[in-house]
Amino acid sequence: MTVERNTILHIAAEQGHSQLIQELYHRFIKDNGFLSHCNLALDTPLHCAARAGHVDAVNVLIHLACEDRRENILECQNASGDTALHLAARHGHGAALEALVAAHASACKLNKAGVSPLYLAVMSRSVVAVRAIITTSGDVSSAGPSSQNVLHAAVFKSSEMVHLLLQWKPALANQVDCKGSTPLHFAASNGKLSVVSAILRTAPPTTVYTKDSDGLSALHVAARLGHADVVKELIGVYPDVAELRDIRGETFLHAAAKERQSSVVSLAIKNPMLRGLLNVQDGDGNTPLHLAVAAGAPHVVEALLRKGNVQTDVLNDDGHTPLDLASKSTGLFTMISLVVTLVAFGAQGLPQRQDHLKPWNGRDIAQGIEKTSDSLAVVAVLIATAAFAAGFNIPGGYGNDGTANLKGRVTFKIFMVLNAIAVATSVVAVILLIYGKASRSAGSWKSFMAALHCIWISLVSLILAFYSASRAMTTSWVVFIVFWAIYMSLYALMIWIQKWVEPATRFRTFWRYVWYSHRADAVKRQYPLASASASNLLLFSLVNIIAFSTLGMMPYFEGSRLSGSP
């Protein structure tokens, strides 16, 4: 024996030497009971052959055991409680498993983890092994861990396996695990429509209405994970399943709104039969709109308001409207997007005295300004340095009289103006950033926003000044290439920044907010940053329009010296 107490039969079986096994048995160990000898892991030679998938070795060992009726190696269990059938199933060795099943190996015996050979065959993704067990064996266990059955595992493995198991035993679809989940719950969470459809065709109708220990149906599970096609299939087959509520009184639409699943919410909005769910309140009085605002999902909020026409003044059990819940958001951009969207569609907060309204103050604003100010100040100083250097080292150099050689060109004059703007705005940005950081007042964000605009203006001015200088010095095709490179780069940069700073709403929604926000004094008092964001975004757009207009007109300026003009 080896140090692990493996005999020569263990080694031969593991290597698949079937003829050697037979020769050794008949010559030396026929009467010594070595077929059932166990190593330290309690594995017999049959365990070793089944684990390695050597069919010939398995057949030889089974045949030899049949000759010697004193040794029942098929039912021997190792230290983990696995029989040879368990090992062949775990590793997906279909041919070896067929040989064991044909020899009447028990498929109803469980190992120490409470797992059957059929469950292990499903986990190995071996359709051959699964088919061999359910078609050849008489008494077959379908048990798995945590009270699962084989269908719970099969929904994640193979559609073919699901069809095979449902044909064999349709009752599997209605069994639940230790948390009350059916295989349909598992399939809905996986989002594979073909598997869900197969279960719906075979399972009893009660399966669709089964709830887990949290009161969630399969429809709730699919909605939480955003599997809109599965939601549509479930409602299409069983329309009244949409009315199911969990232990908190939430429908599937509440679950989708809470998890920011806009595809499921849009599906409910488009279905006329589900329109009644859009304003339904859960156990805490929250509508889907309340939960979408609390979850910080502007896209879901906008879909509910713009397409669903939901009510915006519903009070939950705490007396809060959806707009009131926007104050609980800790993210600046999320809060702005929510307030802009809600106000654009006429949402109002709980009526209260104006002097009791507290301005929103997210936890991340002060920290964000504190961390960003230093970096922005460095950027502003670098822009000012570059602009100063360009002002003294002017393109074209100086003449003998000490004046610029290109002073008569229009593009050179434009360069000087733009360079001066870059210097001035970058210096102003540095001052604003230092003031905002030093003051640490509640309104420091205003100086911070003003500094951002100044930095953007200085950066754009410096880019335009560079192109003007290139235009003044030469009119060759190189300038044309430089023009388009700058134009496209500036456009891409502008789009990226605008996507970053603008509210996550549609353009029409933003303009609706601009139109209606002047009437909402309470909103301006409670959410001053939302109102300021609209003004800042308009200013940002205006600067970009001026910049692109200037850049677009550059190629039409005359590059030669203007006669008679100063």
Image: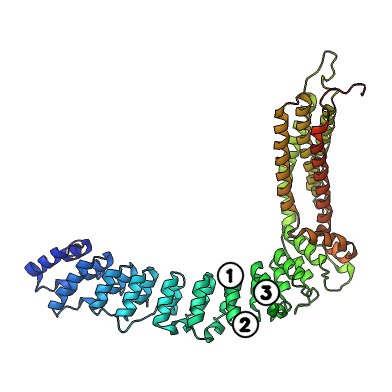
What amino acid is found at the position of numbered circle 2 in the picture?
Pro
Disc 3: CA contacts within 10 A as few (<14), some (14-19) or many (>=20): many
The x and y percentages for residue 121 are: 36, 72
Residue depicted at x 32% and y 71%: 89
Who comes first in sequence, dot 3 or dot 1?
1
The part of the image, by quadrant, that contains residue 230 is bottom right
* Contact? badges 3 and 2 (CB < 8 Å): no
Mark 3 highlights which residue?
A: 268
What amino acid is found at the position of numbered circle 1 in the picture?
His
Q: Which of 368 and 132 is in front in this view?
A: 132
Disc 1: CA contacts within 10 A as few (<14), some (14-19) or many (>=20): many
| Residue 227 numbered mark, or none | 1
Q: Quadrant of the C terminus?
A: top right
Q: Helix, strand or loop at disc 1?
A: loop
| Residue 239 numbered mark, or none | 2
The part of the image, by quadrant, that contains residue 453 is top right
